Image: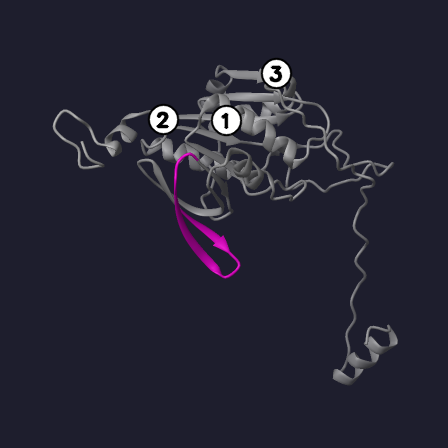
Amino acid sequence: HRGTEGQEGSPSDSDQRQDRRMRALVAVKRVIDYAVKIRVKPDHSGVDTAGVKMSMNPFCEIAVEEAVRLKEKGVVTEIVAVSVGPQTSQETLRTALAMGADRAIHVKIDGEVRSLGVAKLLKAVADLEKPDLFFLGKQAIDDDSNQTGQMLAALMGRPQAAFASKVVLDGGRATVTREIDGGLETMAADLPMIITTDLRLNEPRYATLPNIMKAKKKKIDATDPATLGVDVASKVKTIKVSEPPVRQGGGKVEDVAGLVKGLQDKGLI
């Protein structure tokens, strides 16, 4: 048959795409909860996480929610959550499972892993899982790097759409509206595709108690960088972590002349 026209007894390419299973991988990260005041370690080697509430990165929650909504629409058939980090990252994976993911993969590694290392590990997982869609949060609130999704797309050699505020799937093609400095941009690309989620894409659901209980029985496969054949050694080293300087209080002036004099006295103009 020719293209998408099809013939009797010979389904079109579009029909074949709709009939096959569509898998979505969703990367999730465990971070310090957004409501917690950050404390720096006394030796300035990093952020103190001892006894601190941890939760799923908010942008990762949006990524999971979008995958679940696509599954509820009958577009995605399987959702696999994946996380890179220490053993405690499995708690974040359980949250993703309670939100609606079908199974999870934990790439266990202790210590800091930078964006490129994470992207390499996610690429190795994608090589095994063969996803049609790979969702990531646009950035993590702990380092604000906004790099992993773009690096992953480059390593996989697949199209990407960062800062997504709307995602529409039609067969083997995705149309994504993304937020840019000048407004909104709409782009379309063939699957497989990497999409990073922005704040206005959706509002994540709360996991219900029954789903939290069901999540405890869902499967989490464990692996590590050595098993995946990935070197995550970084050439970048954190020298020092410090808190921002305390902001000084402002003052009031009577008029423009007073403002100018004040700035001149401080040597600012």
Residue density around tag 3, few if under 14, some if 14–19, many if 20 or more, within 10 Å: few
Mark 2–mark 3 CB contact (< 8 Å): no
Horizontally, residue 257 falls left or right of residue 88, namely right
Give the residue pinned by disc 1.
126
- Look at the numbered disc 1 and give the secondary structure of its residue: helix
Residue 186 within the magenta-colored segment of the rendering: yes
Amino acid marked by disc 3: Thr
75, 147: nearer the viewer:
147
- Picture coordinates of residue 40, whole percent (x, y): 80, 39
Instruction: Examine the rendering and report whether any part of residue 34 can be seen.
Output: yes
Residue 180 within the magenta-colored segment of the rendering: yes
Colour logic: one colour
Q: Quadrant of the N terminus?
A: top left
Instruction: Examine the rendering and report whether any part of residue 255 can be seen.
Output: no
Query: Which numbered circle lies on residue 156?
Result: none
- Look at the numbered disc 3 and give the secondary structure of its residue: helix
Q: Nearer the viewer, mark 2 or mark 3?
A: 3
Query: Which numbered circle lies on residue 227?
Result: 3
Amino acid marked by disc 1: Ala
- Picture coordinates of residue 266, whole percent (x, y): 86, 72
Which segment is the magenta one? 176-192
228 is higher (above) or lower (below) than 55? above
How far apart are the alpha carbons under marks 1 and 2? 16 Å
16, 35: nearer the viewer:
16
Give the residue pinned by disc 2.
77
Amino acid marked by disc 2: Thr
Residue density around tag 1, few if under 14, some if 14–19, many if 20 or more, within 10 Å: some
How far apart are the alpha carbons under marks 2 and 3? 27 Å
Labels 2 and 3: the sequence-earlier one: 2
The residue depicted at 17 percent of the width and 37 percent of the height is 5
Residue density around tag 2, few if under 14, some if 14–19, many if 20 or more, within 10 Å: some
